[in-house]
Amino acid sequence: MKAVFHGRQEYVPMWQKMQEFTNTRDDKTPDEIWFVEHLPVFTMGLNASEEHLLEPGDIPVIKTDRGGQVTFHGPGQLMIYPLINLRRSNMGVRALVTALEQSAVNLAADYDVEAVAHPDAPGVYVNGEKLASLGLRIRRGSSFHGMALNIAIDLEPFTRINPCGYAELQMTDLHRLGINLSLEDAADKFLPHLLNQLPL
């Protein structure tokens, strides 16, 4: 398993790189986990409804090939992209979702913050506010896209949408929960939790 921190990147080029990696990999290609921070963008999943895009304003809107509804990505948010051959790992999609969610729960627990995952509404929540959102795609037995973990992000753009399709859903981040980490430190602390959850 190779972990790569790509820093701050435009959304579309990273999406294209994920697609290329997934389309060209074979059964011997090592799995990778990419950590990325994006410039401001709203992304919509395959089945996302336009009604949840309220007032995007000057922030670009990108229709993607991931699951899930509409969400916001921007500076101060850590994107975690697991590029994993699930077939080789004998791992189902639900198991990968659970691994990502539990890793965020465990990271919060390291700082005595109680976070939870909801099976009926994928993601990680603290006191009913959403800390992390998920949207995956599986192609050729391998995963791409992944999880957005809010570290210290401007939450205003989330008011321009119904986050993940839920009106009135409030968002939060680690900073507001009293956990002050840089994106690089958050990635470093998240990675071992994820590796412990994956059957690799």
Image (spheres, rainbow, N blue to C red):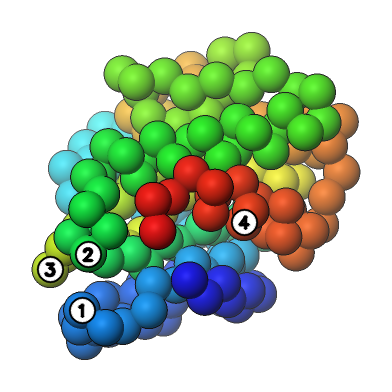
Which is more N-terminal, label 1 or label 2?
1
Q: Look at mark 2 in the image and give the residue it sits on.
A: 88
Q: Nearer the viewer, mark 2 or mark 3?
A: 2
| Residue at 26% in and 83% down | 28
Left or right relative to 173: residue 128 = left
| Residue at 22% in and 64% down | 88
Q: Nearer the viewer, mark 3 or mark 1?
A: 1
Instruction: Determine crowd level at label 2: few under 14, some 14-19, many 20+ residues with C-alpha closer than 10 A.
Output: few
Which is more N-terminal, label 1 or label 3?
1
CA gap between label 2 and label 3 equals 11 Å
The location of residue 155, given as percent across then percent down, is: 65, 38
The dot on residue 191 is 4
The dot on residue 27 is 1
Q: Nearer the viewer, mark 1 or mark 4?
A: 1
Q: Say if 115 sits above or below 18 in the image.
A: above
| Residue at 87% in and 43% down | 180
Q: Look at mark 3 in the image and give the residue it sits on.
A: 140
Which is more N-terminal, label 4 or label 3?
3
Q: Is residue 161 visible?
A: no
CA gap between label 3 and label 1 equals 10 Å
The location of residue 53, given as percent across then percent down, is: 35, 39
